[in-house]
Amino acid sequence: MYTFGKRTLVLSGLALLSCFASAQYTLTDGGATVDIDTSNGTIDNFILGGVDHAFQHTYYLRNGDGGTASGLGTFALLSSSNPLANFAELVYGNGTFEIQIRYLLTGAGQQADLAESVVVRNISGQTASMRLFQYSDWDMAGTAGTDTVTRLNSSTMHQMDNIATLNTVVSGGTPIPEFSELGGFAGIRTNITTTNGYFLNTAAGGGIGQNFVGDGTYAFQWNRSLAAGGVFSMSTDKVLAVPEPGTMIVLGLGVSALLARRRRKLA
């Protein structure tokens, strides 16, 4: 299910590139489906309950505190494999860093867990300052503009759809990121990729309970100084849950009852 406004805007900008079809891995398990664009390491579909809840989930990387972060589409795809229906591994490199991402999808009924493990290796032969960003833009229930994103703690965000409140994703990272940020589409992504030396706006320990209502997005940032050959590892989980069909009927009846009471009160 496509979110018309955002997807139309982005896809129209890519129309001239349509002749260069990108490879894709599709992970499936327990009724859940995740599509990964191997050309840029982007998840653009996370389907559960017959609905696509994802718009874009990906990584950006910068060396040092100057310049802008680059998406994995600017890296070389060094290797890729999809040996199991619910597992894939991608490895990218750009001369300074090599980044390996492993994806594992586990589905069960109306809930799914996408686990990611990320390893960044300094392959430059000299010390490099890694600035790794994980960026997420979920459109819960397949719609943009009706979500609430809340920072539960320094490494965990919670997002839910305000119409179907049980459509929810909880995303967290280990180790705790140095910075995080939540806000509307597409400000965070634009700052990461176009603002010189951009750092996300909330340091670890701050902003607990902060939320954004609307077309919500969020990002985490990890900073490390890696010696030549040095390695940084982290992992994240995206736990997605949608309501049972019976629950949706009850929710619908509840909304109808509220509207009826409101009409009686206004009469």
Image: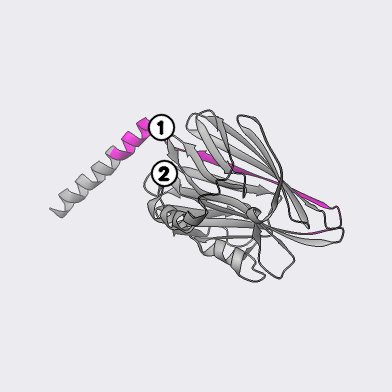
Residue extending furthest toward the front: 19
Residue located 65% across and 71% down the image: 196
Residue interval drawn in magenta: 224-252
Query: 42 or 255: nearer the eye?
Result: 42
Question: Relative to 113, is 212 above or below?
Answer: below
| Whole-percent x, y for residue 170 in the image | 55, 45
Q: Which is nearer the N-term, disc 2 or disc 1?
A: 2
Location of residue 79 (image quadrant) = top right
Query: Which label sits on residue 111?
Result: none
Please give the residue where the numbered disc 1 appears in the rendered image.
244
| Kind of residue sitting beneath label 2 | Ala
Residue at 44%, 52% (x, y): give it.
7
Q: Is residue 206 magenta?
A: no
In front here: 75 or 193?
75
Is residue 157 shown to the viewer in this render? Answer: no
Which residue matches tag 2? 141
Residue at coordinates 56% horizontally, 61% vertically from top-left?
A: 189
**What kind of element bears circle 2?**
helix
Q: Secondary structure at mark 1?
A: loop
Residue 112 is left or right of residue 175, and the answer is: left
Quadrant position of the N terminus in the picture = top left
CB of mark 2 within 8 Å of CB of mark 1?
no
Find residue 207 and report its horizontal and vertical position in percent. 58, 62
Tell me where residue 217 appears, x and y as whole percent: 51, 56
